[in-house]
Amino acid sequence: MDKEPITLNGLNKLKEELIFLKEKKRPEIVAAIAEARSHGDLKENAEYHAAKEEQSHNEGRITEINDIIARANVIDVTKINNDGKVIFGATVFLENLDTGEKIDYKIVGRDEADLKKKLLYFQSPIGKGLIGKNKKDLVEINTPAGVKNFEIKDVKYL
């Protein structure tokens, strides 16, 4: 079983989701199944089948989160001496040399990645291209959308 790097924030969010699924969602689904059962014939009972399907998804996600937590290798970059190197958990401030656009990303694990929130999966093309580089480096990264050129303006361990 491979350890999966995760930030402290990512781990806390997973734990919160797990509590919600177990303590709030699970009892709601059980109640919905009981309610649907009371309506009689289960073969043609859409509410019953929908509730059973929701139960299956919920239990699957609980299992998935438990597995992620079991494999979690928490990396707290705030405890690491910042030498300007891009590492897992670092926030990288970039300038796109082709467009002049400035953007920043936090490099995170698979379960935290969300480009809308500027959370970049460390195994993505840009994530892989940045890890190990240093502040002020010029980086050329092959992405599915073509080659992108960046300058690493700053690296923070937040």
Image (tube, helix red, strand yellow):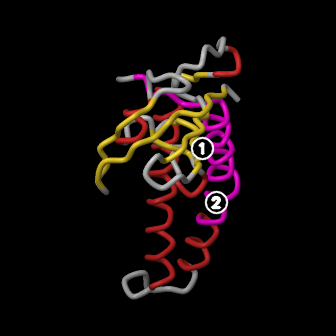
Q: Which residues are magenta?
A: 3-29
Above or below residue 141? Residue 80 is: above
Callout 1 secondary element: strand
Q: Which residue is mark 2?
A: 25
Q: Considering depth in this image, is 109 or 146 the residue closer to the camera? A: 146
Would residue 26 appear left or right of 46 to someone viewing this image? Answer: right
Spot occupied by residue 131 in the image (x, y as percentages of width and height): 44, 27
Report x, y in % for residue 3: 42, 23
Q: Could you say which disc has been placed on residue 120 in the image? A: none
Residue at image x 61%, y 34%? Answer: 91
Question: Where is residue 104 shown, x and y percent of the image?
Answer: 60, 44
Label 2 or label 1, whichever lies nearer to me, is 1
Q: Residues within 10 Å of mark 1 (few under 14, many from 20)?
A: some
Q: Amino acid at mark 1?
A: Asp
Separation of residues labelled 2 and 1 (CA atoms): 35 Å
Three-letter code, disc 2: Lys
Describe the element under mark 2 as helix, strand or loop.
Answer: helix
Question: Label 1 belongs to which residue?
Answer: 104
Q: Is residue 72 left or right of residue 125?
A: right
- Residue 54 against residue 133 in the figure, above or below: below
Q: Main secondary structure of the magenta part?
A: helix
The percent position of residue 22, horizontal first and vertical second, equals 63, 49
Q: Is mark 2 in CB contact (under 8 Å) with mark 1?
A: no
